[in-house]
Every structure is written in C-alpha cells, then in structure tokens.
Amino acid sequence: MPFPRSSGVLLHPTSFPSRFGIGDLGLEAYKFIDFLEKSYQQYWQVLPLGPTGYGNSPYMSYSAMAGNPLLISPEKLLDEGLLTEEDFANLPAFEADKVHFEQAAPIKIGLLKKACENFKTKASSIQQKEFAGFCDSKAYWLDNYALFMALKDSLNGASWHTWEPQLARRELEALARAEQQLTAEIFYYKFIQYEFFRQWSNLKSYANMRGIEIIGDIPIYVAHDSADVWAHPESFCLDEETGEAALMAGVPPDYFSATGQLWGNPVYNWEELQKQDFKWWIERFEAMLDYVDIIRIDHFRGFEAFWAVKQGETTAINGEWIKAPGEELFDTIKQKLGKLPVLAEDLGVITPEVEALRDKYEFPGMKVLQFAFGSDPGNPFLPFNYPRNAVVYTGTHDNDTTVGWFNTANDYEKHNLLLYLGSISPDGIHWDLIRLALSSIANQAIIPLQDILGLGTDARMNFPSVAEGNWAWRYQSHSITDELSDRLKVLTKLYGRAPRGV
C-alpha cells in the first residue's frame, strides 16, 4: 500500500556500540531511536532478526520466526536481577568498530545461560506467568525451534539431515525421547526467545511512542539447516533419500556476480503449500508482525517466478525459471490478515509479470541511486523516472557505501552523476546522494547510517556471494552527533518528509 511521504535510516542492531563485542538491544539502541526522532525520521529499517549460523548472515537463519539471542542485552538482564556486575568483570577489550562473532558469541551465550539458571530460581510469579504465556502463544513455532536447537547442540552442530534417521524424519517416539533427555536445554532456548521478544517489544514500543515505525526484512527463503525445513520438509523441494536440497535457490548472473548467486536454500514445494492454504506463510507473516510495523519482502520477484538450480551445481548459471503462485498467496494472506504493510525488494531481473504482481497489491518497489548513472535517461533508477509509490535508497546492505561506490565508480558513471548534480558539494558525495534521495518524488527514502556518517568501503555491510567476513560493521557512540542530526533534520523538513506538525 502507498505510504505517506517520509524517510528513515537503515541500520542492523548488531551495528550498535556495545561492550559485549556485538550490538544489542540495550542503551545504545534507545539512543539511536532518540537520534531518529531528533532528525525527524519516521522509520528504522533492520535486516532479518533471526538466529544466525555459519557466516553470520541474517539471511541464513536457524528459524524464520525466532530472534537472534546475540542481540539480547546483558545489561537489561542485569536490570532484571538475572545477572550481576561481577558477571561482567572479565570481559575482553573488543574492537569498537567491528563485530568479532567468534569471540563475542561464547561470552554472550555464557551470560545467557547464567541468566537462564537465575531465572529458574529468582523469577517472580508474574515473570513465570509471562514466560508461560509467551511459550503458549508462540508454541506453533517455538516448540519445534527449541527442540531443533537443543538437538543440534547435542549433536555438535550437525545439520539435521545428517542426524539419525528417526530424528531427521521426526518419528514421534524419537522426538518424545529427545524432549525428555533435553528438558533443560529446551527450557534454555525458550527462555532466550522470551527474553529476546521482551527486550525487542520494549524497544519497539519506545520507538513507536516517538513516531518511529520499524521496517523488518523477511527473506523469501529459509536456510536448509533450520527448524522450519526440519519441521516442514513436505513444504520444500528436498531429496527424499538424503534430505538435502533437490532444487536450490539463487539468481542468474547479474550486477553483483557474473556467475549468479547460488544461495543453497531449498526452494518451496508450492503445490504442497497451496494444499495447506499457505498455512506456514500466514504464520510467518503473523510472527513477523509481532516484531515490526512494516515488512520488506526480500527477493519479491521469487513470488512470481523463481530461479531453481539442481542439486550438485556449484554456480547459479545452470538454473531455470519456475512459476510461483504469488497472486494466490497474497490473496490468501490478505483474506486472513487484511491489507499488509509491505515493501517489495524488486531489484534484479524484473519482468512485466513481476511488476503486475507488485502493483496489484500496491506494494512500493525499491529504487537505488547507485544503480542510476551507468546507462541512459531511460534508467528506472534515475529520480525523474520514479513513481511516487516507491522507496528510494542511496544504497542497500548489499551495496558499497556511497563514498566507497563513488571512489570506485567508472568514469562514465562519475561523468553522468556530475552532470546530474551540477557539482559535488563541500559536504561530500554522500550528502549529495542523501539530498537527491530526499528530494525525489518517491514516498519513502531510506538512508544507510554509513552514508549519513560519510564512511568508506571499510564500513560496507555485505559483499553478495562472498561467504565470510560480512555483517561485521559497527559504529562508535561518539559518531552520532547533534550536528549530524541537525543536518539530516533540515533536509528532511526541506523536502517535505518531516512528521506532521513539526
């Protein structure tokens, strides 16, 4: 649906400052919300919030519906009386502007386990009732997730399709035996989801009270090694004998990669999902709307047709397009949940059929300024070609920062950009593109925090098709200044994107 003229900032919570080596939902998150409010921003966009596995990618999560325990703030657990200052006595000196996942994860997990044990003995009757209510209301995904993670830990992290057949195939006796043997571990995984949801809900309420809505990101696919695929194998295209992905998701060769992107996720068995009246997808959207106000659907074009690559291929070149029942899916979701607040990530190979699907439901598409200057005046990413019902970005998490992009752009792109702008302002190319985004007719403009800070390639969040070394950028507390807030506020008001009444 179309949104009012407005703007916001893209920043994943792992990028917050924190003494625990990774950003979390503690004080710095609240300070960031204050910065948004002072700057007249109305949106905070995040990446997927699920628990991550190998490579730390939020797009390869162990669950489509759970929250990442590494985002839980130990200091908030201290406020609850579940940890003490002594528990923080021997923290290492983490690098301030980078997440070291391998170093931070065991420390935070150790703190979470200690908090869990304290919860068992110290929780008030009100807390116990809240926990029980949470477990009951989220049982449709939480039970499978907690058992999946407990089993995974007990089997040294092995992927579910390599477990003993009785567990991999979810035979009832084997599951009942595992639940009995892993009672404490299952409790722990339910507890940390309760804590994540509680902390996130409090932060979201704080944001909403200040006129900030949260844009969440829902990846179209889920990881093969996830509670979702293990619990619902019939809904995915799997090899019946091995449990591996028989058809893998990805995209053909594109702007980002000459060999395409082979993601490795199993594609959906849409026929089976149709038979179930898309029950899993409806539950997924319901769970997502517990966390966020607006949903950005990643790889939206996959709902019209998806690129499928057969098992055994090592690149995405030898795939094929297969039709998907997107219209039937969104009709069903609309019937069950009403009109959804959705943004469509419609980048890549977009056909008239994809545009028709997007436009039928009035989902705003995405425009990225870094893609605008490499061709001719017909380029759809040039601001004068935008429809109003669109979201403009200087760049996304998959792009270089604006400063980094400009420094490596070819002469043709730089020439076109300079002709378009007239000149580069003393404030720098990043503020020129921010101004260009805010001044466009697109209803929404989203700016990565790295561009507001004017950072180079070192602050890039992700290199698509590169498996390691991503998602690690963090900023420092002193980086967000009143001067930055005032500059963003002036431009936001100038271009008619400020909240009403200011």
Image: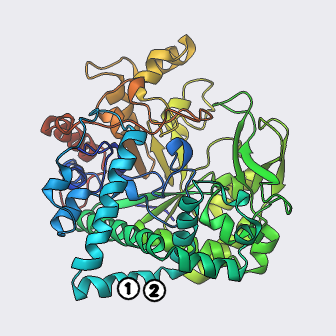
Instruction: Mark 2 and mark 1 in contact? Answer it, CB < 8 Å.
Output: yes
At label 1, which amino acid type do we have? Ala
Q: Can residue 11 be seen in this view?
A: no
The image quadrant of residue 490 is top left
Q: Residue 15: image x %, image y %?
A: 34, 43
Q: Is residue 256 above or below residue 125?
A: above
Q: Residue 285: image x %, image y %?
A: 54, 71
Q: Judge left or right: residue 99 versus residue 20.
A: right
At label 2, which amino acid type do we have? Asp
Check residue 161 in the rendering and tell me which mark sits there, or answer none: none
Q: Name the residue under label 2.
A: 136
Relative to the observer, which residue lies in front, 355 or 267? 267
For the residues labelled 2 and 1, the Cα–Cα distance comes to 6 Å
Q: Name the residue under label 1.
A: 132
Q: Is residue 320 above or below residue 160?
A: above
The image quadrant of residue 319 is top right
Q: Residue 478: image x %, image y %?
A: 16, 35
Q: Is residue 169 above or below residue 429?
A: below
Which residue occupies 70% across, 82% down?
172
The image quadrant of residue 394 is top left
Spot the residue most to the top. Answer: 411
Which residue occupies 33% across, 48% down?
107
Q: How is the image coloured?
A: rainbow
Q: What element carries label 1?
A: helix
Q: Residues within 10 Å of mark 2 (few under 14, many from 20)?
A: few
Image quadrant in which the C terminus is located:
bottom left
Which residue occupies 27% across, 74% down?
119
Which residue occupies 30% across, 52% down?
24
Q: Judge left or right: residue 413 versus residue 315.
A: left
Q: Can residue 195 be seen in this view?
A: yes
